[in-house]
């Protein structure tokens, strides 16, 4: 009767899993649009183009992001600022700024390359379109408005979570701009009206403690 | 035949058919839900409360899909095969009594499609017919994977039907000792399982009167063999070599689409339910159970037998789902060796043993 006892062993595994699932624990999938998974703070989502607190654009049209992009999905053309009414504090500004989201691999190298912190990433990840053309995000979609609000492609969609655009902006540097790895407790970027303001980064131990029991 | 009798026959058939259709729709959903729970998933939850209308949505979708006919098929057989699968599947359930008889006026209505005096033989015949559907579908598709599936179905059906039949014979023989002569009518077999063992074995009365007089207790080995055989007979995991998605795409129904595929799908789930119902009828006492007649309203004691029947059947249906979620598919040689080297000798041995026991109880031991 080895056959039956082995069968019983297998049945016990599935049966106890079933009881666990019905009991509410042990469910590994979620009802996705209704119930969102926790996203880690440094999640790489859709890009956003930032402004200074006075409303000036940060992008200076230098094309370093386009150069750093391994997927070749960023296209930038700079234009001389009009001295009377400059768009950015520098000589030039990003006159054309396009990201092809179908090619983008969300590596964040553009964010690291940017000398003025003009491009950062948000938590928004639902970017499906029914049209290839719509997947190319231009200045109009990427640039935040003067009050610091980030445009959403489908703001009226019932599933649109506008908070995603306001979280984790600017958390994406792997190392400090100075190149020093031990940057805990130091506020790295300041004076940005990016989508969010943030406190200095906690140390690794604090973060480990904070994320305990957290599935992200 | 009077008009009243005629209408009662129509009523019986329509009731049985309707019950089967509704429960099949529920069963497809139930299986997906149960298997999802066993795999830590949520399962269908979009259509209707708890996704219970998912099967209806799938059925509607398949109904409006094109039934693609590949160029190389043998058209007649190809079109006929889905019907050959569905019709026997429904006919099998017609034999199963699913509730206590009740009275309309002076007419008795048995809750059973038809009470044939050769009911069990009819069931065996029909379940063999269902194999033709698979074999013919596989052969007429004119494609290699369905053909392999069809050939597998042939061998599998031959090996497991023998074990199933032998297990049934043991029950029928035992059932013959429980009443007046042998019977193959399912209504009669259910009738003979009413009451408790206390009425039969007075020696153990204090204990035995709490044990229902179901065939499973004296015939436990036959029950296990029958259970394994019906899983194989309905081509369910772990005996689903006929379909075997990973090796044979979809097996015999690879080339079927739209409503023709839906019919195979329907037949599979109807078969699961009818086979479980037959197992419940033969071994678990069918609709027998305490009805508390007199102490509860008549309507409740009239419905309780159907509830008992469904509970017993669903216990076995659940076992089908449970096993499917647990066991990987058998290899082909394992399937054959389980069938021929274990189940058939086991069933034969059990048959001989129970023959001797029955004979000794009937006629006394030869050395006594």
Image (spheres, coloured by chain):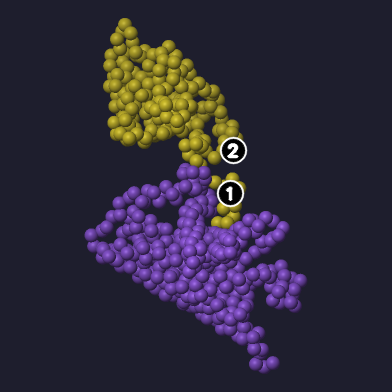
Q: Which of label 1 and label 2 is nearer to you?
A: 1
Instruction: Tell me if I can see residue B341 in this picture.
Output: yes
Residue farthest left in this picture: B71
From the image, state the color of chain A: yellow
Element at label 1: helix
Q: Residues within 10 Å of mark 1 (few under 14, many from 20)?
A: some
Q: Which residue is rendered at x = 54% and y = 24% of the image?
A: A200
- Say which of B366 and A72 sits in front: B366
Left or right position of B188 against B331: right
* Chain identifier for the purple-coloured part of the image: B
Chain for disc number 2: A
Residue farthest right in this picture: B206
- Say which of B314 and B172 sits in front: B172
Q: Which residue is mark 2?
A: A212
Q: Position of residue B172 (x, y in %)?
A: 55, 77
The Cα–Cα distance between marks 1 and 2, rounded to whole angstroms, is 25 Å
- Say which of B286 and B166 sits in front: B286
Chain for disc number 1: A
Q: In terms of sequence position, does the residue under pointer 1 or pointer 2 come before the other?
A: 1
Q: Which residue is rendered at x = 47% and y = 37% of the image?
A: A33
Can you say which quadrant of the picture contains the C terminus of chain B?
bottom right
Q: Which residue is mark 1?
A: A22
Q: Residues within 10 Å of mark 2 (few under 14, many from 20)?
A: few
């Amino acid at each position: 009767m080895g056959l039956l006892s082995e069968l019983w062993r297998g049945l016990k595994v599935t049966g106890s899993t079933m009881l666990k699932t019905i009991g509410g624990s042990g469910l590994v999938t979620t009802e996705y649009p209704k119930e969102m998974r926790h996203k880690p703070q440094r999640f790489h989502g859709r890009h956003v183009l930032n402004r200074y607190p006075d409303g000036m654009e940060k992008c200076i049209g230098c094309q370093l992001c386009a150069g750093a992009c391994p997927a070749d999905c960023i296209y930038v053309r700079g234009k001389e600022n009009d001295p009377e009414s400059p768009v950015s504090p520098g000589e030039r500004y990003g006159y054309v700024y396009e990201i092809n989201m179908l090619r983008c691999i969300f590596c964040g190298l553009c964010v690291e390359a940017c000398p003025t912190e003009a491009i950062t990433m948000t938590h928004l990840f639902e970017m499906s379109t029914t049209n290839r053309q719509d997947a190319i995000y231009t200045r109009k979609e990427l640039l935040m408005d003067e009050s610091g609000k980030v445009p959403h492609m489908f703001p009226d969609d019932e599933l649109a979570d506008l908070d995603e655009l306001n979280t984790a902006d600017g958390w994406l540097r792997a190392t400090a701009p100075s190149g020093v790895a031990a940057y805990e407790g130091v506020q790295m970027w300041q004076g940005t009206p990016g989508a969010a303001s943030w406190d200095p980064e906690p140390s690794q131990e604090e973060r480990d403690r904070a994320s305990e029991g957290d599935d992200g | 035949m009077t008009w009243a009798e005629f209408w009662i026959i129509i009523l019986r058939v329509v009731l049985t058919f309707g019950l089967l259709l509704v429960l099949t729709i529920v069963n497809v959903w139930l299986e997906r839900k149960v298997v999802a729970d066993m795999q830590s998933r949520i399962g269908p939850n979009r259509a209707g409360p708890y996704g219970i209308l998912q099967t209806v949505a799938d059925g509607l979708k398949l109904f409006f899909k094109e039934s693609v006919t590949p160029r190389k098929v043998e058209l007649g057989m190809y079109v006929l095969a889905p019907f050959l699968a569905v019709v026997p599947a429904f006919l099998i359930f017609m034999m199963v009594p699913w509730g206590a008889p009740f009275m309309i006026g002076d007419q008795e209505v048995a809750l059973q499609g038809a009470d044939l005096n050769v009911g069990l033989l009819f069931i065996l015949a029909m379940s063999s017919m269902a194999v033709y559907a698979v074999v013919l579908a596989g052969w007429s598709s004119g494609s290699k994977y369905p053909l392999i599936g069809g050939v597998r179905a042939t061998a599998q059906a031959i090996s497991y039907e023998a074990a199933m039949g032998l297990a049934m014979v043991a029950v029928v023989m035992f059932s013959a000792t429980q009443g007046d002569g042998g019977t193959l009518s399912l209504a009669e077999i259910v009738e003979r399982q009413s009451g408790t063992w206390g009425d039969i074995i007075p020696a153990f009365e204090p204990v035995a009167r709490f044990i229902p007089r179901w065939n499973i207790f004296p015939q436990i080995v036959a029950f296990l063999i029958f259970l394994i055989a019906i899983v194989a007979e309905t081509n369910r995991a772990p005996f689903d070599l006929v379909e075997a998605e990973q090796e044979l795409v979809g097996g015999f129904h690879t080339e079927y689409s739209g409503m023709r595929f839906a019919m195979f799908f329907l037949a599979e789930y109807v078969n699961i339910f009818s086979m479980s119902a037959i197992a419940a009828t033969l071994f678990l006492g069918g609709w027998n159970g305490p009805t508390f007649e007199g102490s509860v309203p008549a309507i409740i004691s009239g419905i309780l037998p159907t509830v008992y029947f469904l509970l017993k059947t669903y216990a076995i249906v659940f076992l089908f789902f449970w096993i499917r979620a647990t066991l990987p598919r058998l290899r082909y040689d394992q399937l054959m060796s389980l069938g021929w080297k274990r189940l058939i000798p086991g069933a034969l041995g059990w048959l001989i043993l129970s023959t001797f026991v029955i004979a000794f109880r009937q006629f006394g031991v030869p050395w006594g």
